[in-house]
Image (tube, rainbow, N blue to C red):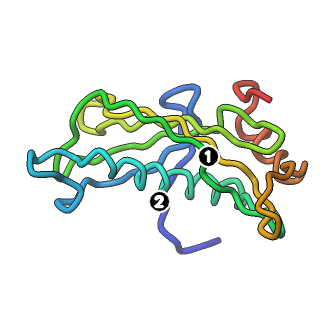
Amino acid sequence: MTDEPELGRVTHRRAPFGYSALTRVWFSDTDAQGVVYYGRYLPYFDHARTEYHRHLGRLSVEGAEFVMRASSVEYHAPARFDDLLECFIRIERLGRTSVTYECAAHRVADDELMVTARQTVVLVDMATRRPVAIPEDARAPIRAFEGGALVE
């Protein structure tokens, strides 16, 4: 048992997503027009991804690290200062050396879709800086959590 606050949570509210994390829009996240600066969504999704992995028991491989390979973002509606956002995240695809995440940020007050994203990370050997296969012990908790929606 831990006394740490829950920063992310299992959810069945928005299939196929099974996990989400809440984030508040701070004044420093907004631009001169009073809306969330487009680049701030990446840290929001990083937060959701970190909490997702914490829930799965951390995704770590000795001597290797996951590095960002690709990120695409689409903006659907503007979020503003003090909005509470729920950032949904899931692993959409589990490749031999890579993992692709699907992300979606919704404003909690009216459930409006703000932003969607896809991000792919690659497992890289830290000594050689070359891609390496994701081991089975790292794949198993992802399969167990994502179930039939996971593409391999």
Q: Quadrant of residue 75?
A: top left
Q: Residue at x 63, y 60 (%)?
A: 54
For residue 69, the mark is 1
Out of 20 and 32, give the one closest to the viewer.
Answer: 32
Q: Horizontal and vertical percent for residue 134?
A: 84, 49
Q: Residue at x 82, y 46 (%)?
A: 139
Residue 15 higher or lower than 35, as above or below: above
Count residues near mark 1 (Cα–Cα under 10 Å), then give few for <14, some for 14-19, many for 20+.
Answer: few
Q: Which image quarter is the N terminus in?
A: bottom right
Q: Horizontal and vertical percent for residue 51?
A: 56, 57
Mark 1 or 2: in front is 1
The amino acid type, in three-letter code, at marker 2 is: Leu
The amino acid type, in three-letter code, at marker 1 is: Arg
Residue 21 higher or lower than 5, as above or below: above
Q: Which image quarter is the C terminus in?
A: top right
Q: Quadrant of residue 128?
A: bottom right
| Mark pair 1, 2: CA separation | 26 Å
What residue would you read off at disc 2? 7
Q: Residue at x 81, y 62 (%)?
A: 125
Q: Residue at x 58, y 26 (%)?
A: 16
Horizontal side of 51 relative to 127 (left or right) equals: left
Identify the element where label 2 is drawn. loop
Residue 101 higher or lower than 26, as above or below: above
